[in-house]
Amino acid sequence: MHFGSIDPDAGTFELNQRYAASRRAGAAEELRREFRLGDVEFTCWQYVHPHRYQRVGPSSTEPLWWNIDCSTPVDVRQQNMYAWFLGRQEDISSFYTIIEGVKPRE
């Protein structure tokens, strides 16, 4: 798990958004989840990376590793936030619980 923000004046701001979208290209599964951080939208994409679709056992249908990429919209530079997760399915709910507890700075 990782949480952070990008300097609002960074020249790579839009590039980081495009890179996150490219990581999801060809995902085996993809789910979208929306949150509100004050008055700012926060979108999470949960997916299985196509090159990391490792299974627990030869007959298992559950992937070993799940990815989640979350971010605020590009135009919310002053209140931007991103988060990512790489881990087991049973740990995903803990990641989302942390996000639900995030409050904007006043």
Image: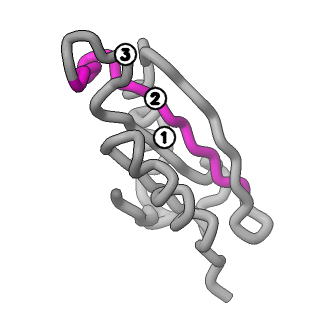
**Would residue 96 appear left or right of 63 to someone viewing this image?**
right
Which badge, 1 or 3, comes first in the chain's sequence?
A: 1
Name the residue furthest right: 39
Residue 17 bears which disc, if any? Answer: 1
Looking at the rendered structure, the kind of residue marked 1 is Gln
Q: Nearer the viewer, mark 3 or mark 2?
A: 3
Looking at the rendered structure, the kind of residue marked 2 is Tyr
Q: Is residue 54 above or below residue 77?
A: above
To which residue does mark 3 refer? Answer: 61
In the rendered image, the quadrant that contains the N terminus is: bottom left
Looking at the rendered structure, the kind of residue marked 3 is Thr
Instruction: Locate residue 11, reporting x and y percent.
Output: 41, 52
Q: Measure the alpha-carbon separation of dots 1 and 3.
A: 31 Å
Which badge, 2 or 1, comes first in the chain's sequence?
A: 1
Q: Please, which colouring scheme is shown? A: one colour
Instruction: Locate residue 34, reporting x and y percent.
Output: 70, 47
Tell whether label 1 touches label 2 (CB within 8 Å): no
Which badge, 3 or 2, comes first in the chain's sequence?
A: 2
Highlighted magenta segment, given as a residue range:
41-56
